Amino acid sequence: MADIVTLNPLSREDWLAQLADVITDPDELLQILNLEANDELLAGREARRLFALRVPRAFVARMEKGNPHDPLLRQVLTARDEFVMAPGFSTDPLEEQRSVVPGLLHKYHNRALLLVKGGCAVNCRYCFRRHFPYADNPGNKRSWQTALDYIATHPELDEVIFSGGDPLMAKDHELDWLITQLESITHIKRLRIHSRLPIVIPARITDSLVARFARSRLQILLVNHINHANEIDEAFTTAMGQLRRAGVTLLNQSVLLKDVNDDAHTLAALSNALFDAGVMPYYLHVLDHVQGAAHFLVSDDKARQIMRELLSLVSGYMVPRLAREIGGEASKTPLDLQLKQQ
């Protein structure tokens, strides 16, 4: 087996330093991983003009040296396939670029999605928001207040989802302010946070953030985004333990990605690693048809075949729901309801 990259991890208090310690040059990433820049890899370098390369060294530390097919590397490395204009793919696959107020999406009846911050710790090449106009959603208290005013006047809402970008790019004092405002809106019961930061930089789960969650009147759910068991390490498991003791419900959503996790045994390993870390598998999304990511696509038929096999490998509570999100629909569309009928 190839060697794991050895980097000096920073303390959990230094998440901002880890966030700043990123690789943005494909050549540097390949050099760290002892990979030769062959024609295929070199041809993909210019894809950073389409969507910037960004990967923290804390995440690179979990990649295997000498392995050009490493499943974590494949998620973040630029590829020449990103230049392919695939039919049926668009820059706004979920029809999200029409917000009710800047930075707030009210797609579903009882829940609204607040784009807290536009940036991410890592740029995943399959991101369905890789073309999103974040410049129109500034992610500051003024824009948040406009969204909060909308939420306060819509009593059908009982849940707010923090999204982005990555909402945990907001600092602890910013999140404290937002949570405090939501707690004052009586019809809001739940706060759901969708984030990749806890797995990319586990140090983001600070003591002060955990304490704030623990004293909230809201039911707080953290939906991680983890696609492969190799992403999970001891630091992440420790952070999840703190959140669980604070009463936070821990879930995970994955994306089914070609040559990353499109295999039942790979997904079984992920479900087991998640459960061991105290996180429940929640959704397995088929790829959103975003332009530039078609090379990650797994067909619906293969996805269902993988799920049928996964059902035989793990306990039922470890099987995520296979689903697709369709712009304009009132909910996600389950694809696994047909499994027993085929």
Image (spheres, helix red, strand yellow):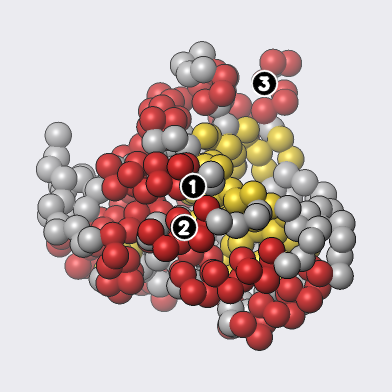
Instruction: Look at the numbered disc 1 and give the secondary structure of its residue.
Output: loop
Say left or right for 147 vs 268: right
From the viewer's side, name the closer residue of 312 and 287. 312
Q: From the image, tell me which residue sits under label 1.
A: 246
Instruction: Look at the numbered disc 2 and give the secondary structure of its residue.
Output: helix
Question: Where's residue 88, x and y in %?
Answer: 67, 55
Quadrant (top left/top right/bottom left/bottom right) for the C terminus? top right
Q: From the image, tell me which residue sits under label 3.
A: 339
Label 2 with label 1: CB-CB less than 8 Å: yes
Single out the residue that lies furthest toward the bottom: 142
Label 3 with label 1: CB-CB less than 8 Å: no
Kindly report the distance in space between the C-alpha atoms of the residues bearing marks 3 and 2.
42 Å
Instruction: Look at the numbered disc 3 and give the secondary structure of its residue.
Output: helix
Question: Where's residue 72, x and y in %?
Answer: 33, 48
Which label sits on residue 211? 2
Kindly report the distance in space between the C-alpha atoms of the residues bearing marks 3 and 1.
37 Å
